């Protein structure tokens, strides 16, 4: 008899993604198609920023179940906002998904889970990842949390039809334990949603010493990375960044949705003008290590770079660079190839160019580490980014001076 997940397992194993027989058996045994709802959403090519529905009647719907694609299974928290011309069912924000199978397998394998381990999963979604955990470790070993009550019910139904009845809790797993439920302790914690800015210390507190937390982690404007933490006896966890992991963000940590244009008011009478030694183009330097450091040390920063017009050859290489944060702080830097000092304007409580410059200095002091040299510590004080070892925490204690 053909295994329910044979086609997907073949897709993943032929591409070299599966190396652990435990998870190979789980992929073979669980039918991913049974966890894909009648409607999924994909990006619209004609209308960027919108997601168009694709129903089970479309032949692509069935094909995607056995291919290495993530599929959005909910938009706009279950109430689709509509398309650019009012098309019903279209969405603006993906709020739940069935993850890309190769990434699912990578995260499961990084758990290093063994028989007898108890696992807490953050983000049940449609229940597919939960089913894999149940098959591999038994359903009695799995507790899964889902903040969306409707999704939690759908997942429980999907899991029941697949023969699994794990504990499914209505929670995002971030705050206090669910009322009346003993959350207990776990050997492994796996999040299928990204922690943005900080990884909840509650996940560390609920993990036995020597246990493992695997989670996507997002800072700044770049897609998330995958972090694998090992928990110590002092409720502190350390770990490396081990790959890419573009996931949706925990609902309690979603960033402010306003575009940068709404955060900048160049006509505000309280803005200040001056000069700065900080190169405005630093914010757009694409080194992955730098972008992680920038996103961590300058929280909530977003930016836009406007190159000089091509029909103005005398301005070749120049650019206007805007930075802003949702608290109302913003700044403009005028880049010129001649170099510093650069003309700036700024407004708000935060001196964003100074913060950018201090973060660059911190990255340089650490030897300009790449992403593979960076790691994360989570303790009672928060989430810390380090280079080389947990002793090399990256901080920006000073800021370069700006003047008028």
Image (tube, grey):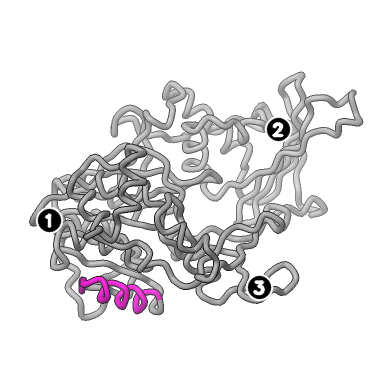
Q: Identify which residue is drawn at 58% across, 36% down.
A: 356
SS class of the residue under badge 2? strand
Q: CA distance from mark 3 to mark 2?
A: 48 Å
- The residue that label 1 is drawn on is 117
- The residue that label 2 is drawn on is 403
Q: Position of residue 394 (x, y in %)?
A: 41, 34
Give the mark toward the camera: 3 or 2: 3
Which circle's residue, 3 or 1, is located before the other in the chain? 3
Report the span colored magenta: 151-166
Residue 132 visible in the current orientation: no
SS class of the residue under badge 1? loop
Residue 101 visible in the current orientation: yes
- The residue that label 3 is drawn on is 82
User: Looking at the picture, does residue 195 appear above or below residue 170?
Assistant: above
Question: 46 or 189, which is in the foreground?
Answer: 46
Is 316 part of what is drawn in magenta? Answer: no
Q: Position of residue 260 (x, y in %)?
A: 68, 52
Q: Identify which residue is drawn at 82% across, 53% down.
A: 267
Main secondary structure type of the part rendered in magenta? helix
Which quadrant does the C terminus fall into?
A: top right
Question: 162 or 132, which is in the foreground?
Answer: 162
Q: Which mark, by number, is residue 353? A: none
Q: CA distance from mark 3 to mark 1?
A: 44 Å
Give the mark toward the camera: 2 or 1: 1
Q: CA distance from mark 2 to mark 1?
A: 58 Å
Question: 285 or 112, which is in the foreground?
Answer: 112
């Amino acid at each position: 008899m053909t295994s329910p997940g044979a086609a997907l397992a073949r897709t993943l194993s032929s591409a070299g993604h599966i190396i652990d027989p435990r998870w190979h058996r789980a992929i073979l045994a669980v039918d991913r198609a049974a966890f894909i709802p009648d409607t999924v959403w994909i990006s619209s090519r004609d209308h960027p920023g919108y997601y168009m529905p694709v129903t089970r009647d479309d032949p692509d719907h069935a094909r995607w179940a056995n291919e290495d694609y993530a599929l959005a299974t909910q938009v706009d928290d279950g109430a689709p906002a509509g398309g650019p011309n009012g098309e019903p069912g279209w969405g603006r924000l993906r709020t739940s998904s069935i993850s890309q199978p190769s990434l699912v397998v990578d995260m499961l394998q990084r758990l290093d889970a063994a028989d007898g381990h108890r696992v807490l999963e953050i983000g049940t979604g449609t229940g597919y990842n939960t089913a894999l955990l149940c098959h591999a470790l038994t359903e009695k070993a799995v507790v899964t949390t889902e903040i969306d009550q409707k999704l939690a019910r759908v997942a429980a139904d999907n899991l029941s039809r697949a023969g699994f009845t794990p504990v499914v809790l209505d929670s995002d797993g971030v705050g206090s334990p669910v009322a009346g439920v003993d959350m207990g302790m776990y050997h492994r914690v796996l999040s299928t949603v990204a922690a943005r800015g900080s990884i909840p210390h509650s996940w560390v507190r609920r993990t036995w010493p020597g246990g493992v937390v695997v989670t996507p982690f997002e800072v700044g404007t770049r897609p998330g990375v995958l972090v694998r933490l090992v928990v110590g006896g002092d409720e502190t966890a350390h770990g490396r960044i081990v790959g890419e992991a573009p996931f949706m963000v925990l609902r309690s940590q979603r960033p402010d949705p306003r575009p940068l244009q709404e955060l900048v008011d160049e006509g505000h009478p309280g803005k200040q003008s001056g000069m700065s030694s900080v190169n405005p183009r630093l914010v757009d330097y694409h080194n992955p290590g730098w972008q992680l450091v920038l996103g961590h040390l300058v929280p909530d920063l977003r930016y836009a770079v406007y190159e000089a017009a091509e029909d103005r050859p005398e301005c070749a290489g120049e650019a206007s660079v805007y930075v802003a944060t949702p608290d109302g702080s913003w700044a403009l830097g005028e880049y010129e190839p001649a170099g510093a000092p650069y003309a700036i304007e700024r407004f708000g409580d935060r001196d964003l160019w100074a913060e950018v410059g201090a973060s660059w200095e911190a990255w340089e002091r650490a030897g300009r580490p790449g992403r593979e040299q960076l790691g994360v510590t989570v303790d009672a004080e928060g989430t810390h980014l380090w280079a080389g070892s947990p002793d090399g925490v990256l901080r920006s204690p000073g800021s370069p001076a700006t003047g008028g």
